[in-house]
Amino acid sequence: MHEPIICFGQQPCGFFPKRYLYAKILTARRLQKEIGGKIVFFYHDSDADYRETITLFRDPLNGEDVRLNFTQENKIQKKYSPLYAKMIPLGWQDEIARKLPRLVPAKFVDVFVSASGASAGDFCLDMYRRLGLLDGIEVVRSGDKLFREQADDLTSDYYADIPYEGEIVRAEKSGDTFRLHEGGGSYITIPAPEHIEQSQKNPGRDYRFRWMQSVLHCTHYISGAGEDAYLNKNDFPDVTFVTRDEISDSNYAYLPEL
């Protein structure tokens, strides 16, 4: 028998991760103690939604919510570039570091100041590692070209990371064209490259698990509330799905004991 492969997936979800990601990690570690095997974190840094990285705190002085996020160099990057290509402008880290002392203990400010990464995806991942959350966990990134070349090729409905106005954007294939979602039912049609390499392609939400599984071959998958709502688990009879453990204040930033 092959050893169990316990997997969970998540977009970068704040430079201090949201508590629901911590709950997935806890669930995976608990399961590993029960059955052995290894844990794989499928880090979906191909997503382009800048709202994913909003870091939510509760102000200890007045109890009000405080939302902090990355900034980008321009509007195209902010709205349409994948998170691995949303580049962090000079000065952002210093600006956030000045805001953190009223929100988190000093030791967490120090962790933040020591972190590095050129993009939102890179920086979040470095923070999660520095916080000790990923010790002993293998990380596989959806934006990694080697991973994409190993995965099932996408031939019809997919997204592609393509050049547009000097940036890399995650554009949706629509017939023979590509488009960017402006919001609601509004789209921008953009020029399609003559050829799309497999390493540029990534799937939409509904095909993401199958695409991931074509490489990782996990035996157990820790699913979140959102995934439970759309994943057709009957399509994957060889995978044991485990719903992540419940956790309070799931959308708020997680601060571990250091």
Image: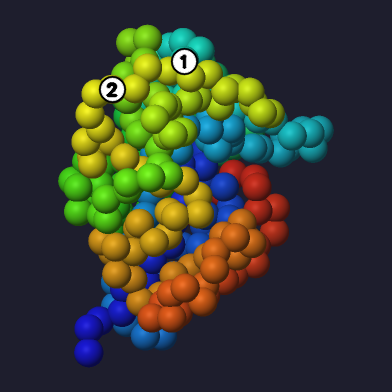
Question: As drawn, is 65 to the left or to the right of 195?
Answer: right
Q: Which of marks 1 and 2 is nearer the N terminus?
A: 1
Label 1 to label 2, Cα distance in Å?
A: 18 Å
Amino acid carrying label 1: it is Ile
> Is residue 92 among what the camera can see?
no
Count the labels in the image: 2
Residue drawn at x 35%, y 56% is 211
Q: In which quarter of the image is the N terminus?
A: bottom left
Q: Compared with residue 71, is residue 200 higher up or lower down, i.e. above or below? A: below
Give the residue type at disc 2: Pro
Q: Can residue 140 be seen in this view?
A: yes
Numbered label attached to residue 39: none
Tell whether label 2 touches label 1 (CB within 8 Å).
no
- Residue that badge 1 annotates: 76
Within 10 angstroms of label 1, few (less than 14), some, or many (20 or more) residues? Answer: some
Please name the residue shown 37% across and 10% down the image.
165
| Depth check, front residue: 5 or 187 | 187
Seen from the viewer's position, the closer of residues 93 and 240 is 240
Return the x and y of residue 116 as percentages of the image width and height.
32, 30
**Residue in the picture at 79% in, 34% down:** 64
- Vertical position of residue 128 compared to residue 24: above or below: above
**Horizontal and vertical percent position of residue 139:** 30, 54
Q: For mark 2, give the secondary structure.
A: loop
Mark 2 crowdedness (10 Å alpha carbons): few <14, some 14-19, many ≥20: few
Q: Please state the horizontal and vertical placement of residue 127, each as a whole percent of the image.
A: 40, 40
- Residue found 53% across the figure and 33% down from its top: 49
Residue behind mark 2: 193
Residue 127 vertical position relative to residue 247 in the rendered view, above or below: above
